[in-house]
Image (cartoon, grey):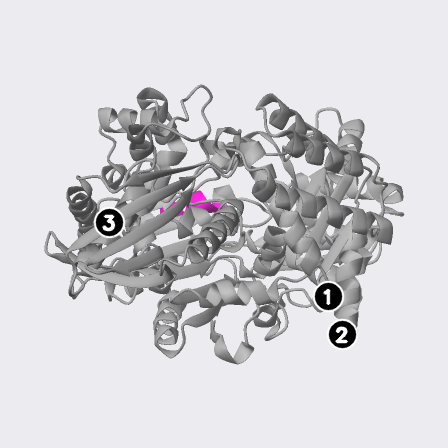
């Protein structure tokens, strides 16, 4: 769909026109296996029509324009089957459906109104052709399970229904026009009462970069104000009319809430409609009906207005309360709100995951070319994009899927095939790569699962969401196993589990980024010049670089390397006493943030601290905290505990600003190198094959030190903040590690014994 606001014109395909729905079910898309089943039946009926020798044509292009509410709706499409004899034009549209046939015509008209609308659009276009007196339109419904067909003529109400749909679409276009008009008058605000000069300069540089290239990279230290600068830049693009929507990607839930807070310092909800798009699982409410017609009735009975909810700043908690009261799934409410939102804040997977990106792509009027994409913590993007393409399954999940299919009375072939897949997984041993025999068996089973949708179709709409995901994965396994090459690793991390991990998603990432009208990548830790662009599938020369400074950060850190200890896995046990003692001494002067590479390591040190002093004030970051839980943990810990044990790379090690200026001392207990496993080794070998001189550094040291820099960067957030940092492992003194420390940490001295440590604590 393309909306030309100046010309008040909407260009739309016949399918988009027919399926457009602004209320519940907005943005619904069809599964890929259904599209394939539809294509096969189209081919079958095409061959039958050709054999009649009646002059049928296929995929005939038709266009028409409809005026509605001062808008021109231009519809284009291709008719499945077309025949012209004398003065009558015959049109057939073929639709596969997931219900048994035959059915009463009223049932099909109510269940599939969009199919009738698409046929009505074609018939309307045919009537506008010269020398046309009569148009006969038929819908051919096909039940792919039984092969039964039911033919229904276009109803007498078709023209009226067509105009009503055109008005509905025009109303949406008018809403987008009003949105653009509101954006053009968006107030220009600064997020700070007295912005720092370097922040103002960074914003000016960003705006200039926006004219030079559609792809830009902002490199700025933590505490510079990257989020507010990026939003300020993005809103300037909306305000100038160069874009109509902004999507802000950040991986952590706490970070998403902070972005929304920053946005509200620049624009109020009634001025700019913003929405945090949380995962579908967080929207779930048990006991609600999933019947589309009942949901629509409940929706209109409750008078749910997505635009008003956005202007009121409704959050997920309120949407769930509304959904429970109205009898409408909160996900349906959120999906409808997306069509009215000018700013969407969400996780990377909504743009880079083939499974999840449909949540945005199916939004009515979605246009990536008219969208600003901001990617926060862009150094994480290569790995996150690869994760989005990777697949995982295990015996337990596969068996549960089989049981669900059996309970839902799926065709026996489905149950048998998924049981065979579960049995295959059950017998897999832990292995760094699959044996040739296991690989061939996996491909054969996956191919069988993928073909089931065509050979034994059934209605998957009634399946629980977790089962729908499994059906989608069944098709994805076959496709990706066939394409798996040096860029993939097929392995079993543990018995009964199968992983197909993407080693590099550079090509796919670059293609997705270039689809957007404007792209801004942001990071404080970009790595060697040009490396981030290459890892994101971009040419470094086409990525406009903006480097910002925060001079007040220089000298804010007092850093030393504790050469007394070795935190490698095989030696750390012998140094637990020194680690616990160092934390206790530093905690005598105020709160200490201790960053660990793993929970297991942190738990060992906490146990040693408590053994030395049962009354020690220590708090270990709980697992699985949501955004609100993380905020509560920090606030309560800073008030009640002296030593905060946190995990490098976790929500409090990256993406959270609650520690800035509140922590006197920080201890990094070893570099957070990735676990040595088949996946990391495959990446190391990939770097080696690409000609890297130090593949181990790229695969292990660089990502580990990036987490260290990210964690320490959070401790100094504004002028006047300072932090004393102890890098608690002798490896930090090695050039291989030291080269990746941020320049703002200076040239840390190495503490070789207890006397050095005591002098440093007194001096700093």
> Marks 1/3: CA distance?
66 Å
Q: Residues within 10 Å of mark 3 (few under 14, many from 20)?
A: some
Q: Secondary structure at mark 3?
A: strand
Q: Residue at x 56, y 51 (%)?
A: 715
In the picture, measured across the screen, residue 549 lies left or right of residue 195, that is right
Q: Are marks 1 and 2 in contact (CB under 8 Å)?
A: yes
Image quarter where the N terminus lies is bottom left
Magenta span: 255-262
Q: Earlier in the sequence, mark 3 or mark 2?
A: 3
In the picture, measured across the screen, residue 183 lies left or right of residue 521, that is left
Residue 433: x percent and y percent? 83, 52
* In magenta segment, residue 256: yes
Q: Are marks 3 and 2 in contact (CB under 8 Å)?
A: no
Image quarter where the C terminus lies is bottom right
Q: Secondary structure at mark 1?
A: helix
User: Dominant secondary structure of the magenta stretch?
Assistant: helix
Numbered badge on residue 692: 2
Q: In this picture, is 401 found above or below 167?
A: above
The residue to which callout 3 is attached is 136
**Which of pointers 1 and 3 indicates the residue nearer the eye?**
3
């Amino acid at each position: 769909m393309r909306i030309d606001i100046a010309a008040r014109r909407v260009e739309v395909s016949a399918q988009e026109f027919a399926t457009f729905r602004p209320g519940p079910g907005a943005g619904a898309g069809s599964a890929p296996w259904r599209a394939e089943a539809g294509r096969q039946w189209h081919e079958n009926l095409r061959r039958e029509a050709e054999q009649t020798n009646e002059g049928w044509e296929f995929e005939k292009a038709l266009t028409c324009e409809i005026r509605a509410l001062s808008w021109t709706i231009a519809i284009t499409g291709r008719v499945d089957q077309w025949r012209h004899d004398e003065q009558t034009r015959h049109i057939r549209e073929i639709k596969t459906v997931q219900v048994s046939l035959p059915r009463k015509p009223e049932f099909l008209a109510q269940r599939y109104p969009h199919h009738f609308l698409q046929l009505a659009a074609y018939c309307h276009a045919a009537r506008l052709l010269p020398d046309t007196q009569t148009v006969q339109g038929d819908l051919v419904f096909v039940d792919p399970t039984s092969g039964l067909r039911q033919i229904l003529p276009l109803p007498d109400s078709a023209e009226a229904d067509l105009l009503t749909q055109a008005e509905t679409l025009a109303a949406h276009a008018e809403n987008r026009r009003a949105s653009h008009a509101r954006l053009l008058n968006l107030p220009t605000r600064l997020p700070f009462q007295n912005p720092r000069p370097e922040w103002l300069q960074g914003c000016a540089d960003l705006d200039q970069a926006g004219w030079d290239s559609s792809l830009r990279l902002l490199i700025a230290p933590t505490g510079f104000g990257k989020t507010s600068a990026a939003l300020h830049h993005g809103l300037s693009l909306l305000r100038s009319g160069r874009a109509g929507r902004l999507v802000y990607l950040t991986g952590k839930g706490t970070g998403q809430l902070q972005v929304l807070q920053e946005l509200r310092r620049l624009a109020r909800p009634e001025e700019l409609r913003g929405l945090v798009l949380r995962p579908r699982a967080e929207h779930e409410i048990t006991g609600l009906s999933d019947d589309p017609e009942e949901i629509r009735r409940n929706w209109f009975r409750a008078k749910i207005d997505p635009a008003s909810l956005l202007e009121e700043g409704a959050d997920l908690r309120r949407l769930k309360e509304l959904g429970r009261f109205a009898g409408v799934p909160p996900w349906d409410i959120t999906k409808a709100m997306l069509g009215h939102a000018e700013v969407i804040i969400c996780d990377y997977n909504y743009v880079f995951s083939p499974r999840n990106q449909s949540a945005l792509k199916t939004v009515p009027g979605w246009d990536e070319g008219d969208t600003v994409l901001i990617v926060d913590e862009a150094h994480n993007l290569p790995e996150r994009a690869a994760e989005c393409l990777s697949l995982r399954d295990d015996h337990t999940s596969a068996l549960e899927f089989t049981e669900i299919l059996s309970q839902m009375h799926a065709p026996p072939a489905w149950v048998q095939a998924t049981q065979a897949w579960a049995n295959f997984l059950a017998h897999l041993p832990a292995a760094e790569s699959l044996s040739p025999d296991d690989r061939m068996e996996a491909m054969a089973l996956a191919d069988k699962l993928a073909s089931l949708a065509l050979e034994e179709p059934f209605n998957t709409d009634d399946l629980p969401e977790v089962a729908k995901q499994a059906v989608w994965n069944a098709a994805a396994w076959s496709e990706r196993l066939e394409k798996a090459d040096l860029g993939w690793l097929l392995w079993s991390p543990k018995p009964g589990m199968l992983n197909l991990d993407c080693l590099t998603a550079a090509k796919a990432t670059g293609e997705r980024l270039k689809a957007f009208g404007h792209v801004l990548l942001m990071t404080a830790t970009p790595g060697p010049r040009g490396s981030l662009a290459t890892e994101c599938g971009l040419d470094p020369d086409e990525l406009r670089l903006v480097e910002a400074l925060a001079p007040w950060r220089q000298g804010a850190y007092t850093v030393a390397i504790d050469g007394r200890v070795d935190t490698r896995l095989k030696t750390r046990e012998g140094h637990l006493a020194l680690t616990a003692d160092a934390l206790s001494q530093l905690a005598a002067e105020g709160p200490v943030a201790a960053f660990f590479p793993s929970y297991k390591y942190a738990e060992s040190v906490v146990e040693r601290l408590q053994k030395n002093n049962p009354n020690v004030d220590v708090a270990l970051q709980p697992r699985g905290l949501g955004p609100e839980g993380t905020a509560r943990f920090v606030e309560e810990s800073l008030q009640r505990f002296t030593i905060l044990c946190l995990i490098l790379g976790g929500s409090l090690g990256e993406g959270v600003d609650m520690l800035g200026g509140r922590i006197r001392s920080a201890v990094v207990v070893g570099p957070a190198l990735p676990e040595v496993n088949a996946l990391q080794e495959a990446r190391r070998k990939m770097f080696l094959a690409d000609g890297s001189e130090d593949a181990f550094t790229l695969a292990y040291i660089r990502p580990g030190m990036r987490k260290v820099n990210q964690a320490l960067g959070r401790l100094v957030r504004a002028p006047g903040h300072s932090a004393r940092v102890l890098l608690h492992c002798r490896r930090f003194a090695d050039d291989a590690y030291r080269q990746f420390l941020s320049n703002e940490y200076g040239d840390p001295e190495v503490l070789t014994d207890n006397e050095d440590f005591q002098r440093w604590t007194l001096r700093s």
